Image (cartoon, helix red, strand yellow):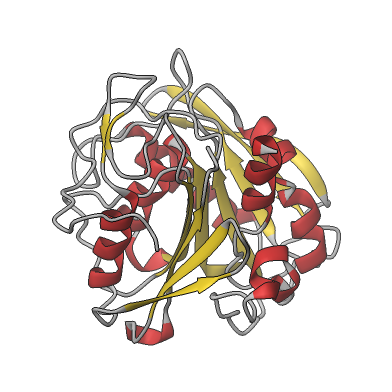
Amino acid sequence: MRRLVCVVVMAILAVAGCSRVSSMAAPATTGGSPITAPTASPCAARRAAPPGQSTRTVTVASVSRSWIEYVPKGYDGATARPLVVTLHGLGSDGTQQLAATGWTTIADRDNAIVLSPNAIGEPAHWDLVGTRRANADIDFVEAMLASVDERLCVAPRLSLNGISNGAAFAAILACALGDRVSAVAFVAMTFQPRDCGRTSPITVVAFHGTDDNIVPYYGGRSEVLPINVPAVESAIVDWAYKDGCGIKSTDQQLSSEVTKRAFIGCRGGTTVDLYIIAGAATLGRAARPSNDWGSPPHKSTPPK
């Protein structure tokens, strides 16, 4: 059951720019995806590429880095397609992330290009040192995106999503990449870096189980690794504040286990939503220790 929750949650992460996102499981029950699809535009020159999955590499600071790239079956090289970056958790890799989440199926359905980069280290992990200091993983993602921009016909903005350590790094990237990112989705980890200099609004959606003992929903010390994490509800309020959303949120009971907390009145038509999964562990793998979890100034209370 808990594994099913994790897989379903990852499968319903919204794809910025996908025309059929509203048919995904959870958004379909709540009136559609919170992410608005951009208008497709042509590329100046056709950028052909065979459909399917491939491994790509780039050298950053003398280190070879790699990612899994999936080009959908409907890609024609002439029309800019939505771009999605999905980030794996601690000890995993890009191939496992694609297999666990079903992003390739979604990509074919919605004609989106999906990138699933590989972290490095033992175990493999994303560096969470912040958005304005030396961070080789940010440099790697920027080099990966430059490669994709050169070879493929993609939309100017992209969406990010990740699980646990990957979700934490998605937050880092959402701040570091600025207007390049239009939306971010977090699974089993929600936080905002202290040094997030982002000023433009961004759509945010988060999923977290209240019984997660690796990344505790109410914040504090992990029961598995020696790390402290912010309370999920505090972190999502931080994102709502940055988006200029109203101070109030509304709760919608989607099922006996799932509550959707929505912030309204956000700038630029963006939305900030938190899906609270009562009793679920969300199978989050722990993020590595960091001094940049962000400050949770708001008191976190259990959902009613």
Q: Quadrant of the C terminus?
A: bottom left
Q: Which quadrant of the structure image shows residue 226? A: top left
User: As displayed, is residue 21 above or below residue 126?
Assistant: below
Image side of residue 207 versus residue 266, left or right? right
> Percent x, y for residue 126?
40, 31
Q: Residue furthest right?
A: 73
Tell me which residue sits at (63%, 42%) in the image.
Answer: 6
User: As displayed, is residue 177 above or below residue 227?
Assistant: below
Q: Quadrant of the N terminus?
A: top right
Image side of residue 227 versus residue 195, left or right? right
Tell me which residue sits at (24%, 41%) in the image.
Answer: 293
Q: Residue furthest top?
A: 122
> Percent x, y for residue 206?
46, 57
Say if residue 129 shows up in the picture: yes
Out of 56 and 236, give the one closest to the viewer: 236
Say if residue 79 shows up in the picture: no
User: As displayed, is residue 96 above or below residue 230?
Assistant: above
User: As displayed, is residue 152 above or below residue 46?
Assistant: above
Q: Which quadrant of the structure image shows residue 108? A: bottom right
Image side of residue 79 versus residue 130, left or right? right
Out of 143 and 17, give the one closest to the viewer: 17
Number of callouts in the render?
0
> Percent x, y for residue 297?
13, 56
> Percent x, y for residue 163?
51, 41
Tell me which residue sits at (41%, 44%) in the image.
Answer: 189
